Image (tube, rainbow, N blue to C red):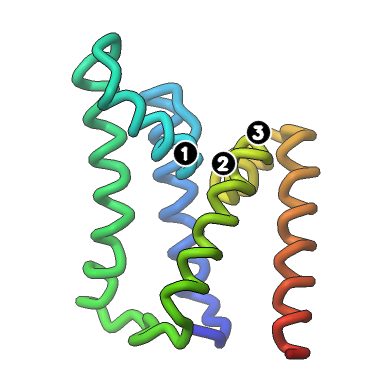
Amino acid sequence: MTEFTLYEALIGGALISVSALILLLFNGKIAGISGIFFTGFYAFLSKNNTQVEKWWRLVFLAGLIMSPLLAGQFDANLPERIDISWPVLMIAGFLVGVGTRLGSGCTSGHGICGIGRLSARSIIATCIFMLTAVLTVFLFKLI
């Protein structure tokens, strides 16, 4: 998972961009995972949303969950285990959730869709969270 593979990276990037483009063209929605998740959660609770509005989000999220299972069938190089404790994993997930709410989006919304639309806000947000990620990895490697 730490070695760069050109063809896999190109295929993966093409699939992500095509899926984001299809969602934008046919549904008018940005493929930001945090927005799809949070808005989807509220869509299921709300009686004002149509069935289509509720279900496309569920299908999109189900595809994200099923993708690693499908990739495993094609001998994709996926991690077999994560060497981190559950409390640390839960804290990290919480912090990511807080960060996506504070930043008005996540890596997919800003980094893929926002930069693709040349959004200045998304370009700045992507630079900030990438810098934060690099610094976080650097600091954890020191420990």
| For residue 65, side relative to residue 29 (left or right) | left
Q: Position of residue 61 (x, y in %)?
A: 31, 46
> CB atoms at circles 1 and 2 under 8 Å apart?
yes
Classed neighbour count for the residue bearing mark 2: other residues with Cα under 10 Å, few (<14), some (14–19), many (≥20): many
Q: What residue sits right under mark 3 in the picture?
A: 117
Q: Earlier in the sequence, mark 1 or mark 3?
A: 1
Where is 132 relative to 25, above or below?
below
Classed neighbour count for the residue bearing mark 3: other residues with Cα under 10 Å, few (<14), some (14–19), many (≥20): few
Classed neighbour count for the residue bearing mark 1: other residues with Cα under 10 Å, few (<14), some (14–19), many (≥20): many
| Quadrant of residue 71 within the rendered picture | bottom left
Where is 139 relative to 70, above or below?
below
Q: Amino acid at mark 1?
A: Ala
Q: Which residue occupies 52% across, 81% down?
A: 5
Residue nearest the viewer, comparing 85 with 47: 85
Q: Which residue occupies 45% across, 63% down?
A: 12
Q: What residue sits right under mark 2 in the picture?
A: 109
Alpha carbon of mark 1 to alpha carbon of mark 3: how far?
12 Å
Q: Looking at the rendered structure, which numbered label has been put on residue 97? A: none
Where is 41 relative to 72, above or below?
above
Q: Position of residue 56 (x, y in %)?
A: 27, 32
